[in-house]
């Protein structure tokens, strides 16, 4: 895959992430302003529970597909790989869903401190397998290079879910309506993806040899998913227990805004890992290092200003998207944003153990920070409130990055473009000064400030020669391509009018 192809696919993934999170952001003001902090906290607890169980159900098989699938493989092999993984995940997903249904009442008492909410867990139990199935189907499309199909299904799911939740919540069904909306969206999204896969490669029986290989590769990743959940989501459970559902809701709303930074690595990583796997299998380690170096450079150029910008705008954004009741969460946003930066940096070094098939080392990489996170949340939250929980998250991700770097360097070393990173930091700080001087109030003012800040950042970075010639050539290539399409569309429309 050439750099232009990598950039093109990364742009598509980036657009997908923007659209998916736009759908999620549409839900934030709707649920917080309609239901309040307590019910929003309840909604987050449901989502966190679904996230935990679906990450268990997937058993690391999404990463397994990405590792072993390649675009251009014959249809029979693709079919066997996909349906073998789907078989494994189906068994795990159904078992977990049945267990959740059977124990919905005691679980509701444990999670929500109210058994009357058991119906929420019944609906959530049915979402778990479909969330896992959709993860597998998405991995298939990514692994086979069908990025546009991957993007279309994810965008459809995000906006379909947002529309259904909006319909049911405003219709008076409350949190139960939100969960039912999520269930319908998950089911429909999986069915659409499944039909596309079947039309492409047909249906196959699971292959025993593939099951064995996949379990050997993927099963060590299953505990990692649970441990990652501990790092990313367990704080919501702990805050609800220590401080109550209302403060858990305030924390979650602020966390959701800061956590946008976690998504910045996705456009790069989703394309990068399958590409690195192919290069590594071909013995082209030099290309693995070069693509990693360049991708990390792009990540820092894009993410650093976002971290600084969202930190400078934390209070106005939170108040604009929620209610004054949520204002205490403003200090949470910068801490979570920095944690997101560390998380994205870690994703680059995380690739190395996967490439060399040392996935068991991830237990150390994730296990130590997860334990530290739980201990820090329990220790800091009673004294510092929700800010203490956010600080615990930041420290945990910094620790995870440090451990990941140490482990990855045992197998592979790659360089970092430090001058580029320094220029990005400098341009971001100048951008922050502009944001603070503008001091926006209200959603439209915030949007206008963001546009001005982005333009200022890239202008300063360009003046500081933060882009090399090849990157500028790629940018010109895509600008010319867009212009050509616009001109062709205009000519076509003009021709149509003349014919009329």
Image: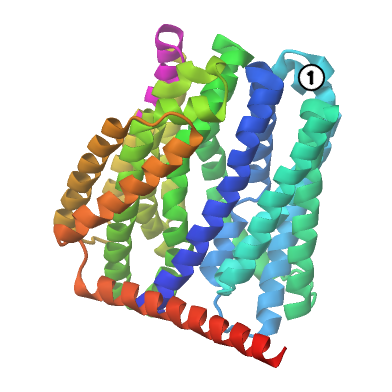
Q: Relative to 168, say whether 462 is above or below.
A: below
Q: Relative to 16, say whether 113 is above or below.
A: above
Closer to the camera, 472 or 84?
472
Tell me where residue 313 sits by quadrant: top left
Residue 222: percent from left, percent from top: 58, 47
Instruction: Tell me how the rendering is colored.
Output: rainbow
Write the residue at 69% across / 50% down. 159
Write the residue at 49% across / 82% down. 487
Write the residue at 70% across / 53% down. 157
Decide if residue 357 is in sight here.
no
Residue hosting label 1: 106
**Quarter of the image that includes the N terminus:** bottom left
Q: In the structure shown, which secondary structural element does the residue marked by tag 1 occupy?
A: helix
Residue 377: percent from left, percent from top: 45, 19
Decide if residue 467 is in sight here.
yes
**Magenta part of the chain:** 380-394
**391 falls in the magenta region:** yes
């Amino acid at each position: 895959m050439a750099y232009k192809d990598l950039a093109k696919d990364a742009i598509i993934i980036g657009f997908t992430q923007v659209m998916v999170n736009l759908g999620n952001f549409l839900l934030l003001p709707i649920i917080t302003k309609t239901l309040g902090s307590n019910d929003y906290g309840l909604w987050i607890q449901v989502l966190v529970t679904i996230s935990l169980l679906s990450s268990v159900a997937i058993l690391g098989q999404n990463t397994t597909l990405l590792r072993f699938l390649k675009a251009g493989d014959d249809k029979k092999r693709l079919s066997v790989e996909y349906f073998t993984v789907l078989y494994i995940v189906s068994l795990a997903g159904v078992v977990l869903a049945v267990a959740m249904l059977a124990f919905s009442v005691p679980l509701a008492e444990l999670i929500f401190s109210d058994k009357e909410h058991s119906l929420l867990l019944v609906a959530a139990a049915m979402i778990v397998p479909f969330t896992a199935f959709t993860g597998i189907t998405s991995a298939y499309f990514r692994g086979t290079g069908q990025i546009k199909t991957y993007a279309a299904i994810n965008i459809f799911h995000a906006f379909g879910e947002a529309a259904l939740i909006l319909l049911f919540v405003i219709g008076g069904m409350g949190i139960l309506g939100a969960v039912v909306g999520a269930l319908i969206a998950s089911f429909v999204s999986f069915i659409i993806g499944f039909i596309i896969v079947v039309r492409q490669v047909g249906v196959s029986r699971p292959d025993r040899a593939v099951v064995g290989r996949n379990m050997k590769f993927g099963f060590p990743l299953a505990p990692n998913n649970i441990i990652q959940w501990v790092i990313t989501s367990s704080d919501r459970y702990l805050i609800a227990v220590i401080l109550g559902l209302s403060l858990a809701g305030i924390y979650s709303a602020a966390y959701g805004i800061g956590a946008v930074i976690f998504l910045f690595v996705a456009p790069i990583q989703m394309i990068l890992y399958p590409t690195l796997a192919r290069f590594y299998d071909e013995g082209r380690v030099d290309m693995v290092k070069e693509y990693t170096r360049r991708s990390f450079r792009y990540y820092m150029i894009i993410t650093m200003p976002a971290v600084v910008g969202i930190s400078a705008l934390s209070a106005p954004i939170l108040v604009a998207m929620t209610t004054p009741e949520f204002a205490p969460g403003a200090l949470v946003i910068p801490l979570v944003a920095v944690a997101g930066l560390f998380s994205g940096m870690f994703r680059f070094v995380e690739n190395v153990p996967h490439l060399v098939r040392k996935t068991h080392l991830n237990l150390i990489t994730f296990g130590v920070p997860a334990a530290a996170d739980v201990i820090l949340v329990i220790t800091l939250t009673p004294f510092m409130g929700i800010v203490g929980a956010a600080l615990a998250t930041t420290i945990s991700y910094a620790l995870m990055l440090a451990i990941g770097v140490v482990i990855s360097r045992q197998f592979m070393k790659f360089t970092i473009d430090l001058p580029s990173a320094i220029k990005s930091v400098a341009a971001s700080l100048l951008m922050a000064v502009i944001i603070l001087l503008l001091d926006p109030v209200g959603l439209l003012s915030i949007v206008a400030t963001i546009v001005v800040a982005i333009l200022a950042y890239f202008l300063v970075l360009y003046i500081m020669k933060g882009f090399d010639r090849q990157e500028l050539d790629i940018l010109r290539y895509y600008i010319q391509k867009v212009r050509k399409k616009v001109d062709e569309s205009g000519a076509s429309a003009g021709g149509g009018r003349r014919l009329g």
